[in-house]
Image (cartoon, rainbow, N blue to C red):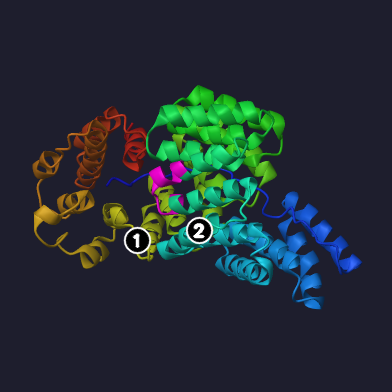
Amino acid sequence: MLRSRTFMAAMIVIPWALSNVANAQVDPKNANPEHEQIKKQADAAYQQRAFTQAVELVSKVIKENPKDDVAFYLRGSSLVEIGLQNRDVDKLRAGIADARQAISLNGRERIDYYLPYLFGMSSLAGLEDKPEHANVAIQVATQVIGLPNVGTAQSANLYYQRARAHGTLQDWQKAADDFNKALSFNPNHLGARLGAGHAYVRMEDFDKAEEQFDAASKTFPNDPRVYNDRGTFHQQSKQFDKAIADFTKVLELDKNAHYAYMNRGFTYMEKGDPKQAEQDFDRALALQPKQPTLYSLRGTARLMQGRVNDALGDYKMVVEMDTKNPIARGDLAFAEFFAGDYANAAKSFASALDSPAKLEHLRPWLYISLVSSGQKNAADSRFGSGPSGDQAGWDWSDRLLAMLTGKISDEDLLAAVKSDETRVKDAQLCEAHFFLGQKALLAGDRAAAAAHFQKAVATNADNLSAHRGSRFALQRLN
């Protein structure tokens, strides 16, 4: 697999709101008037996505009455949302625990209490990469769906939550079936409508996906989430002008939707307009100045315009904000390499490569950075004579490293480009000629290096760092 890219897909899909998860119905009998007022305030805060405020409000109620099922339900719903929003496993687990408590107190009468539990379990499966949590959610949802006192609205929400769990397991057909089942109970269920669209995208049934997104836009013409999600579909299906129109519609409905600026900028970048993309990333950063992904994307847009020093500033910012992210460290390394700062590029590549993420595709880049910065002994010490084992088991980065270390010839490397898929073949040719060009540069053969870099650029594999690096190398040679 070819992964020497300086950016990854960064489209944001807004999580579908939990239909009727909060919106608590309070039984006034023997109720504490002060507590009831607080719970109403917490419910209103939840509906406005002020989840922390909702937690603070009902925590007081729970402290004074640890058997208040509505309070546990509200706090559980809010904590699950906070946990998913911040990728905070502890908050997510706390929300699940609160939902369980609400169920144990009054779950037989109030089926809605299962919703934050199901939502939390499928979300936990994704965050912890443990499919067993999603399987539990499916089992529980199936049991609750079969209860005799489940109403129409509750059935829609339960099928929706079971669909989400199937989606977490990447069982997209079952997810689509359950989203459609939810819609049979409630045709205006926004989450199920958008969920079905995304499930069909994952199954590459783009006609059905478009039907779902278009239906959502007709039913909810003033909801920015609809146009954002349809925009991601249009972007993924390479309908860039339609995607840009959808994200622009989001901004007409919500001028502070930073994610729409980000998604539109990413689309402009995919369309080949990095200057316009940078402007959108600037607007998004004005709204969300502490978002490292935005700095990374803007850095890539600047690289695409040949402004390597400006890009370096952005990538350094990402590393400062997200110090443990090996992808960010790798992006910085690429920019340092393009700027000709091979010593620091070597340090950054080594840091990314030595992380638990095991970014093995960076090995050829680290090798060439070390040799280019006068650290041939360090390169030989780390990589020896190249990859070990039988060549039949080598991946593409093994072959690149083998060529650089002299284990195979230049001709052997080019002969290994045999993919039947044009995109992969062009990408391999791009990387092969880039590293052959680097090898020629180290040997002092500038003419041969330029010829290889020109062949790399001619592949038009412009999403690869090797393609970008070849263009920067030709600028320096000229």
**Residue at (13% x, 44% y) in the render:** 413
Res 371 → quadrant? bottom left
The amino acid pointed to by label 2 is Ser
Asked if the magenta segment contains residue 172, the reply would be yes
Looking at the rendering, the stretch of residues picked out in magenta corresponds to 167-177
The percent coordinates of residue 74 (x first, y second) are 72, 61
Q: CA distance from mark 1 to mark 2?
A: 31 Å
Q: Residues within 10 Å of mark 2 (few under 14, many from 20)?
A: many
SS at circle 1: helix
In this rendered view, identify the residue nearer to me: 291 or 185.
185
Query: Upstream in the sequence, badge 1 or badge 2?
Result: 2
Picture layout, residue 245 above or below residue 197: above
In this rendered view, identify the residue nearer to me: 457 or 200.
200
Q: Position of 140 compared to 362: left or right?
A: right
Q: Position of 164 compared to 404: left or right?
A: right
Q: Residues within 10 Å of mark 1 (few under 14, many from 20)?
A: many
Can residue 274 be seen in this snapshot?
Answer: no
Picture layout, residue 340 above or below residue 461: below
**Residue at (24% x, 33% y) in the render:** 426
Q: Which residue is mark 1?
A: 353
The percent coordinates of residue 52 (x first, y second) are 73, 61
SS at circle 2: helix
Can residue 373 be seen in this snapshot?
Answer: yes
Res 407 → quadrant? bottom left
| Mark linked to residue 122 | 2
The percent coordinates of residue 34 (x first, y second) are 90, 67
Q: Main secondary structure of the magenta part?
A: helix
The percent coordinates of residue 92 (x first, y second) are 59, 65
In this rendered view, identify the residue nearer to me: 110 or 45.
110
The amino acid pointed to by label 1 is Leu
Q: Position of 90 compared to 466: left or right?
A: right
**Residue at (60% x, 60% y) in the render:** 114
